[in-house]
Amino acid sequence: MNMGYLLVLTLIVTAMLMAVQRAEPKKRLIVFILLLIPAYLLRNFVIYREIVTEGWAALTIALVFNLLFWALIGRYNPVRSSDEIQVLGMDD
């Protein structure tokens, strides 16, 4: 198992899953659909390089990381709608 590929794939998949997880609730489906294109390209790269084992391991590790992030941080700090967000220092 090539640890370099595993690390890079894990970082990429974790970032993609985190983007969907932390997207605004109204826009989550749009973000998911937009991330299907890089996910498809990443899948083709994994198959072309014949690093399928690293790809599955990276997906598993990324899912565990995102589950831990959600359990420790995301549950207590949910993503709010952009209408609810107030910027400090604004007088509006």
Image (cartoon, rainbow, N blue to C red):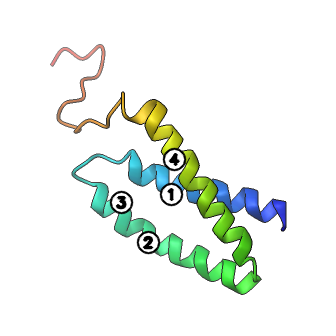
In terms of sequence position, does the residue under pointer 4 or pointer 1 come before the other?
A: 1
- Mark 1 closeness class: few <14, some 14–19, many ≥20 residues within 10 Å: some
Lateral position of residue 22 relative to residue 11, left or right: left
Q: Are marks 3 and 1 in contact (CB under 8 Å)?
A: no
Q: Which residue is mark 2?
A: 36
Above or below residue 80? Residue 44 is: below
Q: Nearer the viewer, residue 88 or 72?
A: 72
* Type of amino acid at the residue the image marks with label 1: Met
Q: Distance from label 4 to label 2 (Cα)?
A: 18 Å
Residue at 48% from the left image edge and 49% from the top image edge: 18
Question: Looking at the image, is mark 4 or mark 2 earlier in the sequence?
Answer: 2
What amino acid does circle 3 point to? Answer: Val
Q: Secondary structure at mark 1?
A: helix
Quarter location, residue 56: bottom right
Q: Could you give the CA–CA distance between mark 2 and mark 1, rounded to whole angstroms?
A: 9 Å
Q: Secondary structure at mark 4?
A: helix
Residue 87 in the image: state x and y as whole percent.
Answer: 29, 22
Q: Which residue is mark 4?
A: 66
Q: Residue at x 36, y 28 (%)?
A: 76
Badge 2 amino acid: Leu
At numbered mark 3, what does the secondary structure look like: helix, strand or loop?
Answer: helix
Place residue 2 in its image quadrant.
Answer: bottom right
At label 2, counting other C-alpha atoms closer than 10 Å, the crowd grade (few under 14, some 14-19, many 20 or more) is few
Disc 4 + disc 2, Cβ < 8 Å: no
How would you rate the neighbour count of disc 3 (Cα within 10 Å): few for under 14, some for 14-19, many for 20 or more?
Answer: some
User: In the drawing, does residue 69 fall left or right of residue 59?
Assistant: left
Q: What residue does disc 3 label?
A: 31
Residue displayed at 60% across by 73% down:
42
